[in-house]
Amino acid sequence: MKINPPPLEEVLSITRDFVSEILKESGARGFVMGASGGLDSSLLATLLKRCNMPFKALFLPDGEPNKDDERAISLLEDFLNIKVERYNIRPAKEVVLKDVLPEGEGTLVAGNLASRIRMCYLYTVANAEKLLVAGSSNKSEILLGYFTKWGDGAADIFPLGDLFKTQLYVLAKELKLPDFIIKRAPTAGLLPGQTDEGELGLSYDKIDIILRGTLLNMPVERIAEDAGTTAEEVLRIQEMVRRSRHKRMGLLIPKMGPETVGLDFHERW
């Protein structure tokens, strides 16, 4: 069972209207985004390019980039006729680790730190050049909490945020992104050899069916049947969604008065 995305022209139209309105409202001159060489960021860059939005992309490896990452970035540059800026974040990361966690290299803590340092690079460029940060997280990752809070989860807009991971593959093929990029195993890149599906314990094909069924309030047994997995796995994924709620909330504030920001405050100015 596949979850098809909206038609490509509809995706482009919605994206164009969304980012145009954000730029007009904010007064920003364009966008800056991180380019990893993976599917999500490559698709985001392609959508921004197709929508004729001004943007710049930064490749932010933690140390010497591997050959596959370099190849993917070069393919993206050729595909979109853009120049991706490159910055090595390792020196900045090492400064923090030396002070806080000297033996932390190679741990998840260090991986999350790398993600947050990338955020600092993106927002420094955005601040200096009057840009907004565009994040490439998709609906699957956001619902699962599969991102670093204040790292890759920090951005001003998430144009892919209402599209499941499996829907991105369909769009990437329709937009004719390079096969090498489409076929790469998705990874957060926080640890050596890490892959999304290996860490999550299920393929995105199954995860997305579980997430969609959960959003539609379908019975657990029916979701498990549709996804070709067990009820226990469905409950495990649903628990991931519940436990990561705090990562999707902008500001967590206890209510003590009228119109609490993050709860029932209505933006109207």
Image (cartoon, rainbow, N blue to C red):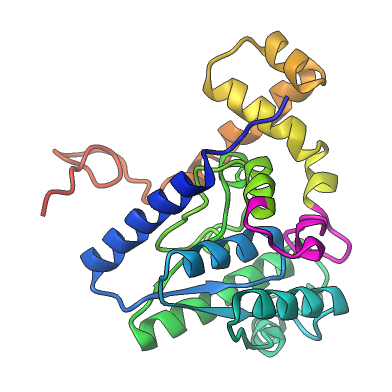
Q: Residue at x 62, y 49 (%)?
A: 171
* Residue closest to the eye, 241 or 24: 24
Dividing the picture into quadrants, the one containing residue 83 is bottom right
Dividing the picture into quadrants, the one containing residue 189 is bottom right
In magenta segment, residue 185? yes
Q: Residue furthest left?
A: 269
Q: Residue at x 57, y 54 (%)?
A: 137
* Residue closest to the eye, 241 or 14: 14
Q: Residue at x 61, y 84 (%)?
A: 84
Give residue 255's position: percent from left, percent from top.
Answer: 25, 38
Give residue 181's position: percent from left, percent from top.
Answer: 76, 63
Of the 4 image quadrants, the one containing the N terminus is top right
Give the tally of numbered discs.
0
Asked whether, in this view, residue 42 is left or right of residue 216, the answer is: right
Asked whether, in this view, residue 217 is left or right of residue 10, the answer is: right
Asked whether, in this view, residue 17 is left or right of residue 146, the answer is: left
* Residue closest to the eye, 175 or 18: 175
Q: Is residue 20 above or below residue 65?
A: above
Give residue 267's position: percent from left, percent from top.
Answer: 18, 48
Residue 151 seen in this snapshot: no
Asked whether, in this view, residue 103 is left or right of residue 161, the answer is: right
In magenta segment, residue 100? no
Residue 142 seen in this snapshot: yes
Q: Residue at x 58, y 22 (%)?
A: 214
Of the 4 image quadrants, the one containing the C terminus is bottom left
The stretch of residues the image draws in magenta is 174-195
Dominant secondary-structure state across the stretch colored magenta:
loop
* Residue closest to the eye, 1 or 215: 1
Give residue 155's position: percent from left, percent from top.
Answer: 46, 63
Q: Is residue 12 above or below residue 145?
A: below
